[in-house]
Image (spheres, grey):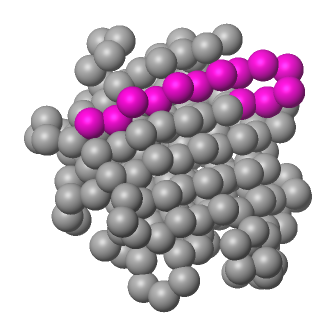
Amino acid sequence: MKTIVRWCDWQGNGLEHCYMREGPEGLLLEGVVAGTREGLYGACYTVRTVADFRTREVRVSYVDGPQLHVTADGEGHWHDMIGRVSIPALDGAIDVDIGVTPATNTLPVKRLRLEPCQSRDIVAAYVPLPAQVDGPFLPRPAKQRYTCLVANRRYRYEGLFRGFSAELEFDAAGLVLDYPDTFRRILPA
């Protein structure tokens, strides 16, 4: 199944074009972002998972900025392909959360398969916004919680690592519709 969506930032200044392909081998997310959160930036990303939605490869590149290429074994062990070193700080993280896009919220929602009223705490590999990069451009561990409110449609996301909470609506493909105060779906609406 192939899906193309676009989001703008909540104020309507930034834009993202995202392509998702889901098949028996796993999920592919590819996107291009012209963002405005914490400064102006351009970014492109690619995320690959295996069939059970465990993240296996992540690439993020900021225009005139750093690049990131990491892989994971699906069991919580991550490796920096640019620096050619393991990333023990991410031990146990199964999902990636790329700060410039709501697309990666799809991954834990699909992987966890929560029933209404169920919640699960996870540690994600958080890829920071360009303005948040301090030192090597690598994902950081980020404690999060997902709670299913309506099966396959509405979830409460809590960024425990930053004291943030939002109710997220998802479409039939599993992609975010609106992410209050952050992203708004514009295509298809």
Q: Does residue 186 show up magenta in the picture?
A: no
Counting every numbered tag in the picture gives: 0
Q: Is the magenta stretch mostly helix, strand or loop?
A: strand
Q: In this view, does 148 lie above or below 1?
A: below
Question: Residue 31 in the image: x percent, y percent?
Answer: 48, 37
- Residue farthest to the front? 64
Question: Residue 53 in the image: x percent, y percent?
Answer: 75, 37
Q: In this view, does 161 lie above or below 104?
A: below
Foreground pick, 112 / 59: 59
Q: Would residue 164 appear left or right of 143 to someone viewing this image?
A: left
At a point 40% along the width and 69% down the height, the residue shown is 65
Foreground pick, 110 / 157: 110
Q: Quadrant of the C terminus?
A: top left
- Note whether residue 180 is visible: no
- Note whether residue 48 is visible: yes
Q: Would residue 110 appear left or right of 71 to someone viewing this image?
A: left
Q: Does residue 19 show up magenta in the picture?
A: yes
Span of residues in magenta: 15-27
Question: Residue 83 in the image: x percent, y percent?
Answer: 71, 80
- Residue farthest to the bottom? 135
Question: Residue 74 in the image: x percent, y percent?
Answer: 85, 53
At a point 61% along the width and 54% down the height, the residue shown is 59
At a point 60% along the width and 35% down the height, the residue shown is 29
At a point 58% along the width and 25% down the height, the residue shown is 20
Q: Quadrant of the N terminus?
A: top right
